[in-house]
Image (tube, helix red, strand yellow):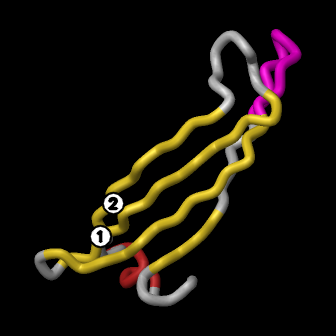
Amino acid sequence: MLGGGWTVGSAPTLSYDWTNDQAEIPINLSVTKTTVIGGRPWKFGIEANYYIEKDEKTRPDFMIGFNITPVVENKLANFLN
């Protein structure tokens, strides 16, 4: 955590197609900011993937995504404690 609600992370999803002998390997980076709106915490994020190995016919070299996520209480965590 960087402080002030900012977070930097990486969660690449690697895959392999055994039928076509094709790997998909991204370099992944995400930045999120948690802020309170209307009394509820929200996470706003941007994520970028650059594919160093991919199927040339179906996957672009670079992808970018935006995420908006409400932060909710985990009732199961309270139950297990």
Kindly identify the residue that appears in the image at 33 percent across and 60 percent down.
Answer: 69
On the image, the x and y values in percent for residue 40 come to 20, 76
Q: What element carries label 2?
A: strand
On the image, the x and y values in percent for residue 61 come to 68, 29
The magenta-colored residue range is: 15-24
Assess disc 1: are there few (<14), some (14-19) or many (≥20) residues with their C-alpha within 10 Å of its C-alpha: some
Q: What element carries label 1?
A: strand
Q: Main secondary structure of the magenta part?
A: strand
Q: Against 61, is 31 above or below? A: below
Task: Classify residue 16 by image quadrant.
Answer: top right
Q: Which residue lies furthest to the left in this view?
A: 38
Identify which residue, 80 or 5, lies in the foreground.
5
Q: Are marks 2 and 1 in contact (CB under 8 Å)?
A: yes
Q: Is residue 66 magenta?
A: no
The kind of residue on which mark 2 rests is Thr
Task: Classify residue 2 by image quadrant.
Answer: bottom right
Separation (CA) of disc 2 from disc 1: 6 Å
On the image, the x and y values in percent for residue 34 come to 37, 75
Kindly identify the residue that appears in the image at 24 percent across and 79 percent down.
Answer: 36
Residue 75 is left or right of residue 62, and the answer is left
Q: Against 63, is 23 above or below? A: above
Which mark identifies residue 53? none
What residue did someone put label 1 on? 42
What residue did someone put label 2 on? 69
The kind of residue on which mark 1 rests is Trp
